Image (tube, rainbow, N blue to C red):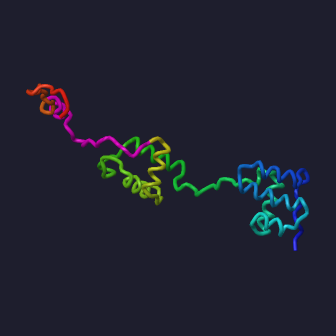
């Protein structure tokens, strides 16, 4: 059987109980109370009962407390999953969006998320879904909404002529005039 790890000498039971009362973090308070039991001379098994955990967890708390003090008993943020796209792949994605698709090469006239997923798979052999591509693009300031696509062979002169001619509304004054009062 191994020897118990000694607690730091710069704290005692009453100090830890005071810190446990003042903390806003419930888990830290529970851990401080368990360690206060050890300072008061109770067994590690009793400290584990107070903390609601096993003796191995109490040992881990003692190591964290000895290394970093009471702040070491606060839950840290989990690191999360590793990103599927590297920084170089993210930059390549941004560059291809900025350049826009080439219809002959990419087979599309505007980028959709599904097209970008396929491009990433073809280019980098990375399998990623549309939601994650959307999140990556959002971090770079892109939004899912896009301008209405324009056909590459569209005649600008014919479009302007149509806008000036037939599409103008012909406003006329109403024959009845303005009716006062409720309808």
Q: Quadrant of the N terminus?
A: bottom right
Q: Is residue 179 above or below residue 24?
A: above
How far across and down, in percent of the image, does residue 127 sit?
46, 60
How far across and down, in percent of the image, does residue 102 sit?
33, 46
Most extreme residue toward the bottom is 1
Q: Is residue 86 magenta?
A: no
Q: Nearer the viewer, residue 73 or 1?
A: 73
Q: Nearer the viewer, residue 116 or 22?
A: 22
Is 5 displayed left or right of 91 in the figure?
Answer: right
* Point 15% across, 27% down: residue: 179
* Point 77% across, 50% down: residue: 71
Q: Is residue 162 magenta?
A: yes
Q: In this orientation, does residue 80 appear?
A: yes
How far across and down, in percent of the image, does residue 166 sit?
12, 32
* Point 44% across, 58% down: residue: 129
The secondary structure that dominates the magenta segment is loop
- Give the residues drawn in magenta, as a range: 142-164
How far across and down, in percent of the image, does residue 151 sit?
24, 43
Is 95 displayed left or right of 151 in the figure?
Answer: right
Is 110 displayed left or right of 51 in the figure?
Answer: left
Q: Choose top left, top right, bottom left or bottom right for residue 7.
A: bottom right
Q: Choose top left, top right, bottom left or bottom right for residue 5.
A: bottom right
Q: Quadrant of the C terminus?
A: top left
Q: In this orientation, does residue 125 appear?
A: no
* Point 88% across, 65% down: residue: 42
């Amino acid at each position: 059987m191994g020897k118990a790890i000694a607690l730091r000498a710069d704290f005692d039971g009453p100090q830890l109980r005071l810190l446990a009362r003042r903390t806003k973090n419930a888990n830290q308070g529970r851990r401080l109370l368990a360690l206060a039991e050890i300072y008061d001379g109770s067994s590690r098994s009793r400290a584990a009962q107070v903390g609601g955990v096993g003796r191995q967890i109490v040992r881990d708390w003692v190591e964290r407390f000895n290394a970093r003090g009471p702040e070491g008993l606060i839950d840290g943020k989990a690191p999360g999953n590793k990103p599927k796209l590297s920084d170089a792949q993210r930059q390549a994605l941004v560059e291809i969006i900025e350049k826009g698709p080439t219809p002959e090469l990419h087979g599309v006239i505007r980028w959709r998320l599904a097209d970008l997923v396929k491009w990433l798979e073809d280019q980098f052999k990375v399998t990623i879904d549309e939601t994650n591509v959307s999140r990556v693009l959002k971090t770079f300031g892109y939004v899912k909404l896009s301008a209405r696509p324009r056909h590459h062979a569209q005649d600008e002169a014919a479009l302007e002529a149509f806008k000036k001619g037939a599409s103008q509304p012909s406003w006329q004054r109403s024959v009845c005039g303005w009716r006062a009062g409720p309808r």
